[in-house]
Image: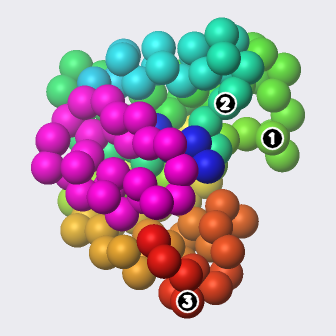
Amino acid sequence: MKVLIVDDILENRKLLWELLKNYGLCDMSGDGQEALDMFEGAITLDQEPYDLVLLDIAMPRMDGQEVLVRMRQLERDNGIAPEGQTAIIMVSAVDASSEVEKAFKVGGCTDFLHKPISRGRLMVKLSEHGLISSNWWAEKG
């Protein structure tokens, strides 16, 4: 699995990397524009899109909502059908139903997780979306 972790707080990126490092290659970005560049490069240059993006909603300069919309546009621009899209899970420390609704309806996110993120909750989400085995709890990781 190829993962892009996007959060402006280094400790959050490190935590998610630690939880996912045994499941595949994890790239990290602390900036929305850098994340977009990495996402686009994975599609157009590498021809190996990300399987998963964990995207923080609240970031300076370019928030996760804008990054999400632009990532989905990049997929459309490059002919990626909806069933082939990257799983984008939005993460936020704020329990704001309007932000969650916007992420789903406007941005087309795959799912949502509230911080702090536990290993169990993250693995359940990944399993639900077919990114890891449904027996994740019995495997090393």
Label 2 environment density (alpha carbons within 10 Å; few <14, some 14–19, many ≥20): many
Q: Does the segment drawn in magenta span residue 129?
A: no
Residue at horizontal 66 percent and vertical 10 percent from the top: 45
Residue 100 in view: no
- Residue 48 coordinates in the image, percent (x, y): 70, 27
User: In the figure, is residue 5 to the left or right of 86?
Assistant: left
Label 1 environment density (alpha carbons within 10 Å; few <14, some 14–19, many ≥20): few
Q: Does the segment drawn in magenta span residue 15?
A: yes
The amino acid marked with disc number 2 is: Pro
Identify the magenta region: 5-30
Q: Residue at label 1?
A: 84
The amino acid marked with disc number 1 is: Gly
Q: Quadrant of residue 106?
A: top right
- Residue 104 coordinates in the image, percent (x, y): 57, 51
Q: Residue at label 2?
A: 49
Residue at horizontal 61 percent and vertical 21 percent from the top: 42
Judge by depth and name the residue closer to the eye, 140 or 33.
140
User: Can you say whether 21 is above or below 2 in the image?
Assistant: below
Q: Residue at label 3?
A: 138
Which numbered tag is attached to residue 21? none
Q: CA distance from mark 3 to mark 1?
A: 28 Å
